[in-house]
Image: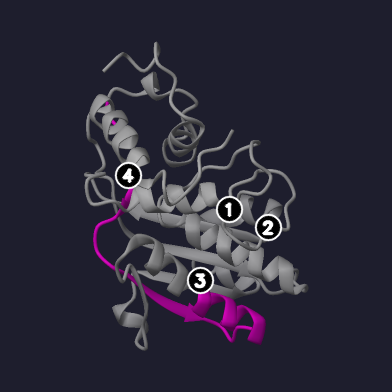
Amino acid sequence: MAHAGEVPLSDRNQYFIEIALGAEYPEAYFISRLVKWKTSVRLWVEGALPVVLREELDALVLEINTLTNRRLIEEMKDPDLANLILYWGTPDSFLEIEPEAEAMLRENDGIFRVQFDAHYYIRSGRIFLNAERLFFDFDQRHFLREELTQSLGLMQDSDRFPESIFYRKQSKVTAYSEMDQYLIRVLYDERIVPKMPMKKLIELLEAIEIENEKTIPLRE
């Protein structure tokens, strides 16, 4: 195949590079630095979720599991078994657990933090949603979807595609765009692994796009 600098990636695959790696152009890295979960995500919810948020979480877990074609996320009944904790509460209570998140909380009503191993596989994480400020249903649903999705490894924001859950500016998006669905499918394709050579990653992105083009229409 031609070098990535000579043959531009499609919008969808360029967006994957941008959101999963934080790089505008794939040649920014020789080795892919994307991160993802290798194990199942064992989710525990800390705090009494409002009804709309509880319903949204149940639907979102089902949607992500369907997109990844696996039981990627499972909610736990025992917090000791969890590797991802969703906190619905006040900033002060969250800072008792994550004091280093203070600067992030001053500017955001929802945040996520993940830890990954030397192979760039995520091993644990925390999500916080501010119960003191997220009053409206659409805000609760938006922040839950954005933070949970980003905690899966799609961690960057973008100024492109206002219909995307990863849109950087103020947004009321409460559903995945076709582009978002594609990114989730690609990240959790078993052929995509962290630290793979960038050339190999680009080859796989192009192959996966061909496989998916009947499912998700290409943008004009």
In terms of sequence position, does the residue under pointer 3 or pointer 4 come before the other?
Answer: 3
Q: Which mark is residue 177?
A: 1
Q: How many marks?
A: 4
Q: Is residue 69 visible?
A: yes
Coloration mode: one colour
Direction from residue 10 to residue 129 in the image, left or right: right
Q: Which mark is residue 211?
A: 4
Residue type of the residue flagged with mark 3:
Leu
Is residue 34 covered in magenta? yes
Q: Nearer the viewer, mark 4 or mark 1?
A: 4
Q: Nearer the viewer, mark 2 or mark 4?
A: 4
Tell me the CA gap for discs 3 and 1. 14 Å
The quarter of the rendered structure image containing the N terminus is top left
Residue, disc 2: 173
Where does the image place residue 102, in percent across and percent down from the top left? 61, 55
Q: Residue furthest top?
A: 6
SS type, badge 4: helix
Direction from residue 182 to residue 111 in the image, left or right: right
